[in-house]
Image (cartoon, grey):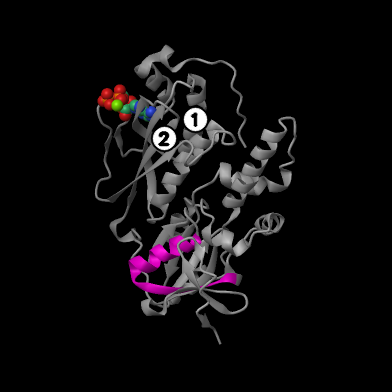
Protein backbone atom coordinates (compact mmCIF):
# COMPACT_ATOMS: atom_id res chain seq x y z
CA UNK A 1 0.00 0.00 0.00
CA UNK A 2 1.03 3.61 0.07
CA UNK A 3 3.80 5.27 1.98
CA UNK A 4 2.42 8.16 4.01
CA UNK A 5 5.23 10.35 5.25
CA UNK A 6 4.47 13.89 6.25
CA UNK A 7 7.30 16.17 7.35
CA UNK A 8 6.78 19.82 6.45
CA UNK A 9 3.65 21.52 7.75
CA UNK A 10 2.37 24.42 5.69
CA UNK A 11 -0.81 26.12 6.95
CA UNK A 12 -3.63 26.32 4.40
CA UNK A 13 -3.78 30.11 4.78
CA UNK A 14 -0.15 30.45 3.61
CA UNK A 15 -1.16 29.61 0.04
CA UNK A 16 -4.58 31.23 -0.01
CA UNK A 17 -7.55 29.69 -1.80
CA UNK A 18 -6.36 30.23 -5.37
CA UNK A 19 -2.78 29.29 -4.56
CA UNK A 20 -4.04 26.12 -2.94
CA UNK A 21 -6.25 25.18 -5.90
CA UNK A 22 -3.36 25.77 -8.32
CA UNK A 23 -1.05 23.79 -6.10
CA UNK A 24 -3.36 20.81 -5.73
CA UNK A 25 -4.45 20.64 -9.35
CA UNK A 26 -1.19 21.44 -11.12
CA UNK A 27 -0.61 17.86 -12.35
CA UNK A 28 -4.04 17.20 -13.83
CA UNK A 29 -3.61 17.18 -17.61
CA UNK A 30 -6.68 16.03 -19.57
CA UNK A 31 -6.50 12.60 -21.22
CA UNK A 32 -9.78 12.45 -23.13
CA UNK A 33 -10.59 14.20 -26.41
CA UNK A 34 -14.10 14.73 -25.02
CA UNK A 35 -12.60 17.20 -22.50
CA UNK A 36 -12.97 20.58 -24.19
CA UNK A 37 -12.19 22.68 -21.10
CA UNK A 38 -10.88 21.31 -17.81
CA UNK A 39 -9.80 23.18 -14.67
CA UNK A 40 -9.37 26.95 -14.91
CA UNK A 41 -12.60 28.48 -16.16
CA UNK A 42 -16.00 29.08 -14.59
CA UNK A 43 -17.16 25.69 -15.79
CA UNK A 44 -15.66 22.66 -17.44
CA UNK A 45 -16.84 21.74 -20.94
CA UNK A 46 -17.24 18.15 -22.05
CA UNK A 47 -18.44 16.85 -25.40
CA UNK A 48 -20.04 13.41 -25.23
CA UNK A 49 -21.39 13.85 -28.81
CA UNK A 50 -24.22 11.38 -29.44
CA UNK A 51 -23.72 9.15 -26.43
CA UNK A 52 -25.66 9.05 -23.19
CA UNK A 53 -24.00 11.01 -20.38
CA UNK A 54 -23.97 9.45 -16.92
CA UNK A 55 -23.60 11.53 -13.76
CA UNK A 56 -23.26 10.49 -10.14
CA UNK A 57 -22.10 12.14 -6.90
CA UNK A 58 -20.90 10.83 -3.55
CA UNK A 59 -19.96 12.76 -0.47
CA UNK A 60 -17.59 11.51 2.23
CA UNK A 61 -17.65 13.05 5.70
CA UNK A 62 -14.91 12.64 8.31
CA UNK A 63 -16.16 10.69 11.30
CA UNK A 64 -19.09 9.30 9.31
CA UNK A 65 -17.50 7.66 6.26
CA UNK A 66 -13.86 7.58 7.24
CA UNK A 67 -11.64 7.73 10.28
CA UNK A 68 -8.25 9.34 9.74
CA UNK A 69 -6.88 7.33 12.68
CA UNK A 70 -6.39 4.39 10.33
CA UNK A 71 -7.19 5.84 6.91
CA UNK A 72 -4.10 7.50 5.42
CA UNK A 73 -5.05 10.57 3.35
CA UNK A 74 -3.62 9.14 0.16
CA UNK A 75 -5.83 6.08 0.53
CA UNK A 76 -8.78 8.30 1.30
CA UNK A 77 -8.22 10.25 -1.91
CA UNK A 78 -7.96 7.03 -3.88
CA UNK A 79 -11.04 5.48 -2.29
CA UNK A 80 -13.14 8.64 -2.74
CA UNK A 81 -12.60 8.35 -6.48
CA UNK A 82 -13.21 4.59 -6.55
CA UNK A 83 -16.59 4.75 -4.81
CA UNK A 84 -17.76 7.20 -7.46
CA UNK A 85 -16.41 5.30 -10.46
CA UNK A 86 -18.12 2.16 -9.21
CA UNK A 87 -21.53 3.81 -9.69
CA UNK A 88 -20.79 4.50 -13.35
CA UNK A 89 -19.52 0.97 -14.02
CA UNK A 90 -22.72 -0.27 -12.36
CA UNK A 91 -24.61 1.34 -15.26
CA UNK A 92 -22.44 -0.60 -17.73
CA UNK A 93 -20.80 2.65 -18.74
CA UNK A 94 -17.32 4.14 -19.02
CA UNK A 95 -16.29 6.71 -16.41
CA UNK A 96 -14.35 9.59 -17.96
CA UNK A 97 -14.40 12.74 -15.80
CA UNK A 98 -14.63 13.78 -12.15
CA UNK A 99 -14.93 17.00 -10.22
CA UNK A 100 -13.54 17.11 -6.69
CA UNK A 101 -14.82 19.43 -3.96
CA UNK A 102 -13.23 19.62 -0.57
CA UNK A 103 -13.84 21.46 2.67
CA UNK A 104 -11.04 21.25 5.23
CA UNK A 105 -10.57 22.75 8.67
CA UNK A 106 -7.32 24.51 9.58
CA UNK A 107 -6.22 21.33 11.32
CA UNK A 108 -5.18 20.18 7.82
CA UNK A 109 -1.95 21.32 6.23
CA UNK A 110 -1.11 21.87 2.57
CA UNK A 111 0.99 18.70 2.78
CA UNK A 112 -1.99 16.73 4.10
CA UNK A 113 -4.16 17.87 1.20
CA UNK A 114 -1.31 17.08 -1.18
CA UNK A 115 -1.42 13.50 0.13
CA UNK A 116 -5.16 13.40 -0.48
CA UNK A 117 -4.62 14.69 -4.01
CA UNK A 118 -1.81 12.20 -4.64
CA UNK A 119 -4.40 9.46 -4.04
CA UNK A 120 -6.95 11.20 -6.27
CA UNK A 121 -4.31 11.59 -9.00
CA UNK A 122 -3.29 7.94 -8.75
CA UNK A 123 -6.89 6.75 -9.11
CA UNK A 124 -7.44 9.16 -12.00
CA UNK A 125 -4.38 7.75 -13.76
CA UNK A 126 -5.13 4.10 -13.06
CA UNK A 127 -8.75 4.48 -14.20
CA UNK A 128 -8.05 6.92 -17.05
CA UNK A 129 -10.14 9.77 -15.66
CA UNK A 130 -9.85 13.52 -16.28
CA UNK A 131 -10.16 15.74 -13.20
CA UNK A 132 -11.96 18.74 -14.65
CA UNK A 133 -12.88 20.92 -11.69
CA UNK A 134 -14.18 21.20 -8.21
CA UNK A 135 -14.45 23.59 -5.33
CA UNK A 136 -12.25 24.35 -2.35
CA UNK A 137 -13.48 25.82 0.87
CA UNK A 138 -12.86 25.77 4.59
CA UNK A 139 -14.83 23.92 7.25
CA UNK A 140 -15.12 24.64 10.96
CA UNK A 141 -14.41 21.04 11.78
CA UNK A 142 -13.19 18.06 9.85
CA UNK A 143 -12.77 17.11 6.23
CA UNK A 144 -15.49 16.76 3.60
CA UNK A 145 -14.93 15.38 0.14
CA UNK A 146 -17.58 15.48 -2.54
CA UNK A 147 -16.81 13.94 -5.90
CA UNK A 148 -18.98 13.97 -8.99
CA UNK A 149 -18.29 11.54 -11.76
CA UNK A 150 -19.30 11.74 -15.40
CA UNK A 151 -19.30 8.92 -17.87
CA UNK A 152 -20.50 7.88 -21.28
CA UNK A 153 -22.19 4.92 -22.88
CA UNK A 154 -23.92 3.94 -26.08
CA UNK A 155 -27.61 4.53 -25.45
CA UNK A 156 -28.46 0.84 -25.92
CA UNK A 157 -25.72 -0.30 -23.54
CA UNK A 158 -26.89 1.40 -20.34
CA UNK A 159 -28.14 -1.08 -17.72
CA UNK A 160 -30.65 0.07 -15.12
CA UNK A 161 -31.83 -1.44 -11.84
CA UNK A 162 -35.31 -2.17 -13.12
CA UNK A 163 -34.86 -4.63 -15.99
CA UNK A 164 -34.67 -7.99 -14.22
CA UNK A 165 -37.28 -10.65 -14.95
CA UNK A 166 -38.36 -13.75 -13.08
CA UNK A 167 -35.94 -16.67 -13.77
CA UNK A 168 -33.02 -14.37 -14.65
CA UNK A 169 -29.76 -15.55 -13.09
CA UNK A 170 -28.19 -13.42 -10.35
CA UNK A 171 -24.47 -12.94 -10.92
CA UNK A 172 -21.75 -11.39 -8.76
CA UNK A 173 -18.26 -10.29 -9.75
CA UNK A 174 -15.35 -11.10 -7.41
CA UNK A 175 -15.85 -11.94 -3.75
CA UNK A 176 -17.50 -10.04 -0.92
CA UNK A 177 -17.25 -9.44 2.81
CA UNK A 178 -13.52 -8.66 2.85
CA UNK A 179 -13.75 -4.86 3.14
CA UNK A 180 -16.02 -5.11 6.16
CA UNK A 181 -13.71 -7.57 7.92
CA UNK A 182 -10.76 -5.32 7.05
CA UNK A 183 -12.56 -2.54 8.90
CA UNK A 184 -13.09 -4.82 11.93
CA UNK A 185 -9.35 -5.54 11.99
CA UNK A 186 -8.48 -1.85 11.75
CA UNK A 187 -10.96 -0.95 14.50
CA UNK A 188 -9.50 -3.64 16.72
CA UNK A 189 -5.93 -2.45 16.11
CA UNK A 190 -6.99 1.12 16.86
CA UNK A 191 -8.25 0.01 20.28
CA UNK A 192 -5.08 -2.02 20.89
CA UNK A 193 -2.98 1.00 19.92
CA UNK A 194 -4.98 3.26 22.27
CA UNK A 195 -4.28 0.88 25.14
CA UNK A 196 -0.62 0.38 24.25
CA UNK A 197 0.95 2.78 21.70
CA UNK A 198 4.08 0.62 21.56
CA UNK A 199 2.27 -2.50 20.40
CA UNK A 200 3.49 -3.62 16.98
CA UNK A 201 0.55 -5.34 15.31
CA UNK A 202 1.16 -8.20 12.92
CA UNK A 203 -1.30 -7.37 10.16
CA UNK A 204 0.31 -9.66 7.59
CA UNK A 205 -2.44 -12.37 7.76
CA UNK A 206 -5.02 -9.66 7.09
CA UNK A 207 -3.38 -7.99 4.09
CA UNK A 208 -6.15 -8.81 1.64
CA UNK A 209 -8.90 -7.68 4.02
CA UNK A 210 -7.19 -4.40 4.94
CA UNK A 211 -6.39 -3.68 1.33
CA UNK A 212 -10.04 -4.21 0.35
CA UNK A 213 -10.98 -1.64 3.03
CA UNK A 214 -8.22 0.93 2.55
CA UNK A 215 -7.50 0.59 -1.15
CA UNK A 216 -10.57 -0.80 -2.88
CA UNK A 217 -10.77 -1.08 -6.64
CA UNK A 218 -13.80 -0.54 -8.86
CA UNK A 219 -14.78 -3.07 -11.53
CA UNK A 220 -13.83 -1.05 -14.58
CA UNK A 221 -13.12 -4.36 -16.31
CA UNK A 222 -16.67 -5.68 -16.00
CA UNK A 223 -18.44 -3.44 -18.56
CA UNK A 224 -15.57 -4.21 -20.94
CA UNK A 225 -15.80 -7.95 -20.28
CA UNK A 226 -19.56 -7.91 -20.76
CA UNK A 227 -19.12 -6.17 -24.09
CA UNK A 228 -16.56 -8.75 -25.22
CA UNK A 229 -18.96 -11.52 -24.19
CA UNK A 230 -21.75 -9.77 -26.09
CA UNK A 231 -23.74 -9.91 -22.86
CA UNK A 232 -26.06 -7.16 -21.67
CA UNK A 233 -27.29 -7.68 -18.10
CA UNK A 234 -30.99 -7.14 -17.53
CA UNK A 235 -30.26 -5.16 -14.35
CA UNK A 236 -27.15 -4.12 -12.43
CA UNK A 237 -26.00 -2.37 -9.23
CA UNK A 238 -22.71 -2.02 -7.37
CA UNK A 239 -22.25 -3.62 -3.96
CA UNK A 240 -21.58 -0.65 -1.70
CA UNK A 241 -24.00 -1.38 1.16
CA UNK A 242 -23.93 -5.18 1.28
CA UNK A 243 -25.33 -7.90 -0.97
CA UNK A 244 -28.66 -8.06 0.80
CA UNK A 245 -29.68 -4.44 0.39
CA UNK A 246 -28.36 -4.36 -3.19
CA UNK A 247 -30.36 -7.39 -4.33
CA UNK A 248 -33.41 -5.90 -2.62
CA UNK A 249 -32.90 -2.74 -4.72
CA UNK A 250 -32.81 -4.82 -7.92
CA UNK A 251 -35.91 -6.79 -6.87
CA UNK A 252 -37.94 -3.75 -5.82
CA UNK A 253 -37.02 -1.79 -8.94
CA UNK A 254 -37.63 -4.76 -11.23
CA UNK A 255 -40.73 -5.98 -9.36
CA UNK A 256 -39.37 -9.48 -8.84
CA UNK A 257 -38.51 -11.78 -5.97
CA UNK A 258 -35.22 -13.64 -5.61
CA UNK A 259 -33.65 -16.81 -4.29
CA UNK A 260 -29.98 -16.50 -3.31
CA UNK A 261 -28.06 -19.64 -2.35
CA UNK A 262 -25.85 -19.38 0.72
CA UNK A 263 -23.43 -22.02 -0.56
CA UNK A 264 -22.84 -20.05 -3.77
CA UNK A 265 -21.83 -16.74 -2.19
CA UNK A 266 -18.15 -16.19 -3.10
CA UNK A 267 -15.99 -15.58 -0.01
CA UNK A 268 -12.24 -15.28 0.15
CA UNK A 269 -10.67 -17.85 2.55
CA UNK A 270 -9.30 -14.90 4.59
CA UNK A 271 -12.88 -13.74 5.22
CA UNK A 272 -13.90 -17.18 6.44
CA UNK A 273 -10.95 -17.49 8.83
CA UNK A 274 -11.24 -13.97 10.25
CA UNK A 275 -14.98 -14.43 10.74
CA UNK A 276 -14.14 -17.49 12.85
CA UNK A 277 -11.65 -15.42 14.80
CA UNK A 278 -14.28 -12.73 15.48
CA UNK A 279 -17.02 -15.33 15.99
CA UNK A 280 -19.09 -13.80 13.23
CA UNK A 281 -21.19 -15.62 10.68
CA UNK A 282 -19.53 -15.16 7.29
CA UNK A 283 -22.84 -15.27 5.42
CA UNK A 284 -24.18 -12.41 7.55
CA UNK A 285 -21.01 -10.43 6.79
CA UNK A 286 -21.33 -11.09 3.05
CA UNK A 287 -24.99 -10.04 3.11
CA UNK A 288 -24.67 -6.92 5.21
CA UNK A 289 -20.99 -5.93 5.23
CA UNK A 290 -20.68 -3.53 2.33
CA UNK A 291 -17.93 -1.50 0.64
CA UNK A 292 -17.02 -4.37 -1.66
CA UNK A 293 -17.54 -2.37 -4.88
CA UNK A 294 -18.21 -5.54 -6.80
CA UNK A 295 -20.97 -5.59 -9.40
CA UNK A 296 -24.22 -7.49 -8.91
CA UNK A 297 -26.28 -8.12 -12.01
CA UNK A 298 -28.91 -10.31 -13.55
CA UNK A 299 -28.80 -12.06 -16.92
CA UNK A 300 -31.27 -14.01 -18.96
CA UNK A 301 -30.95 -17.81 -18.54
CA UNK A 302 -30.28 -18.04 -22.28
CA UNK A 303 -27.05 -16.06 -21.75
CA UNK A 304 -25.68 -18.49 -19.15
CA UNK A 305 -23.20 -20.08 -21.57
CA UNK A 306 -21.52 -16.69 -22.02
CA UNK A 307 -20.34 -16.58 -18.40
CA UNK A 308 -20.15 -20.29 -17.60
CA UNK A 309 -16.73 -21.09 -16.09
CA UNK A 310 -15.63 -17.44 -16.20
CA UNK A 311 -13.51 -16.86 -13.07
CA UNK A 312 -14.74 -13.25 -12.79
CA UNK A 313 -18.34 -14.23 -12.23
CA UNK A 314 -20.36 -16.42 -9.87
CA UNK A 315 -24.02 -17.28 -10.28
CA UNK A 316 -25.48 -16.94 -6.78
CA UNK A 317 -29.18 -17.36 -7.41
CA UNK A 318 -32.11 -16.47 -9.62
CA UNK A 319 -34.94 -14.00 -9.73
CA UNK A 320 -38.48 -15.21 -9.03
CA UNK A 321 -41.97 -13.78 -9.27
CA UNK A 322 -42.49 -10.79 -6.98
CA UNK A 323 -45.11 -12.54 -4.82
CA UNK A 324 -42.62 -15.31 -3.99
CA UNK A 325 -40.58 -12.84 -1.92
CA UNK A 326 -36.84 -12.38 -1.45
CA UNK A 327 -35.03 -15.26 0.23
CA UNK A 328 -31.69 -16.73 1.08
CA UNK A 329 -31.67 -20.51 0.77
CA UNK A 330 -29.34 -21.69 3.54
CA UNK A 331 -26.99 -24.66 3.44
CA UNK A 332 -29.62 -26.46 5.51
CA UNK A 333 -32.07 -25.75 2.67
CA UNK A 334 -34.19 -23.30 4.64
CA UNK A 335 -35.63 -20.19 2.99
CA UNK A 336 -34.81 -17.15 5.09
CA UNK A 337 -36.23 -13.76 4.24
CA UNK A 338 -33.69 -11.18 3.07
CA UNK A 339 -33.85 -7.82 4.80
CA UNK A 340 -31.95 -4.63 4.01
CA UNK A 341 -29.32 -5.32 6.66
CA UNK A 342 -28.61 -8.99 6.11
CA UNK A 343 -31.30 -11.52 6.67
CA UNK A 344 -34.08 -12.05 9.12
CA UNK A 345 -33.21 -15.14 11.12
CA UNK A 346 -36.39 -14.73 13.18
CA UNK A 347 -38.53 -15.36 10.17
CA UNK A 348 -37.77 -18.79 8.80
CA UNK A 349 -41.11 -18.79 7.14
CA UNK A 350 -40.93 -21.57 4.61
CA UNK A 351 -39.05 -24.83 4.61
CA UNK A 352 -37.77 -25.84 1.22
CA UNK A 353 -38.45 -29.43 0.18
P1 LIG B 1 -15.21 29.81 -8.99
O1 LIG B 1 -14.87 31.02 -8.18
O2 LIG B 1 -15.70 30.09 -10.38
O3 LIG B 1 -16.05 28.79 -8.24
P2 LIG B 1 -12.81 28.53 -8.20
O4 LIG B 1 -11.83 29.59 -7.90
O5 LIG B 1 -13.53 27.89 -7.08
O6 LIG B 1 -13.83 29.09 -9.28
O7 LIG B 1 -12.09 27.42 -9.03
C1 LIG B 1 -11.18 27.71 -10.08
C2 LIG B 1 -10.99 26.50 -10.94
O8 LIG B 1 -10.40 25.46 -10.17
C3 LIG B 1 -12.29 25.92 -11.49
O9 LIG B 1 -12.02 25.36 -12.73
C4 LIG B 1 -12.64 24.86 -10.48
O10 LIG B 1 -13.45 23.86 -11.08
C5 LIG B 1 -11.26 24.34 -10.10
N1 LIG B 1 -11.20 23.82 -8.73
C6 LIG B 1 -11.47 24.47 -7.58
N2 LIG B 1 -11.29 23.70 -6.50
C7 LIG B 1 -10.86 22.50 -6.97
C8 LIG B 1 -10.51 21.26 -6.36
N3 LIG B 1 -10.55 21.08 -5.03
N4 LIG B 1 -10.14 20.24 -7.16
C9 LIG B 1 -10.12 20.39 -8.50
N5 LIG B 1 -10.43 21.52 -9.13
C10 LIG B 1 -10.81 22.57 -8.40
MG1 LIG C 1 -15.54 27.69 -6.59
Q: Nearer the viewer, residue 312 or 81?
A: 81
The residue depicted at 55 percent of the width and 66 percent of the height is: 314
Residue 232 in sight here: no
Q: Residue at x 47, y 50 (%)?
A: 220
Q: Quadrant of the N terminus?
A: top right
Residue under label 2:
145
User: Dot 1: few (<14), some (14–19), or many (≥20) neighbours within 10 Å?
Assistant: many
Q: Earlier in the sequence, mark 1 or mark 2?
A: 1
- Residue 250 in magenta stretch: yes
Q: Residue furthest top?
A: 14
Tell me which corner region of the image, top left, top right, bottom left or bottom right, holds residue 282.
bottom right
Q: Which mark is residue 26?
A: none
Q: Is residue 294 magenta?
A: no
**Front position in the image: 127 or 145:** 145
Residue 106 position (above or below residue 52): above
Region in magenta? 243-262
Residue with the mark numbered 1: 116
Give the percent coordinates (x, y) of residue 115.
52, 27
Does 136 appear above or below 172?
above
Residue 83 seen in the current view: yes
Q: Residues within 10 Å of mark 2 (few under 14, many from 20)?
A: many
Q: Cβ–Cβ below 8 Å for labels 1 and 2?
A: yes
Give 233 or 245, whichever is nearer the viewer. Answer: 245
Q: Quadrant of residue 60?
A: top left
CA–CA distance in space, label 1 to label 2: 10 Å
Tally of numbered tags: 2
- The picture quadrant for ligand 1 comes to top left
Q: Under tag 1, what secondary structure? A: helix
The residue depicted at 58 percent of the width and 70 percent of the height is 262
Q: Is residue 144 left or right of residue 345?
A: left
Q: Quadrant of the C terminus?
A: bottom right
**Where in the figure is residue 106, as x and y percent of width and height?**
45, 20
Amino acid sequence: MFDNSEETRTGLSELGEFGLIDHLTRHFAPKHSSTIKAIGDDAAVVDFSNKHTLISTDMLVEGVHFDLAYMPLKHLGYKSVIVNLSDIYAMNAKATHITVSIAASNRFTVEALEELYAGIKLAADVYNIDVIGGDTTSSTSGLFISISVFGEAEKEAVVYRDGAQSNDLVVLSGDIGAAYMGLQILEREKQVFKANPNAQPDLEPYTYLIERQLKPEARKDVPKLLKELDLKPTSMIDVSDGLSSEIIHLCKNSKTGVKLYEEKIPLDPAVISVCEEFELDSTTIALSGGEDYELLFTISQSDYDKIKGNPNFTVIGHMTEEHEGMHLITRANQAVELIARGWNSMDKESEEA
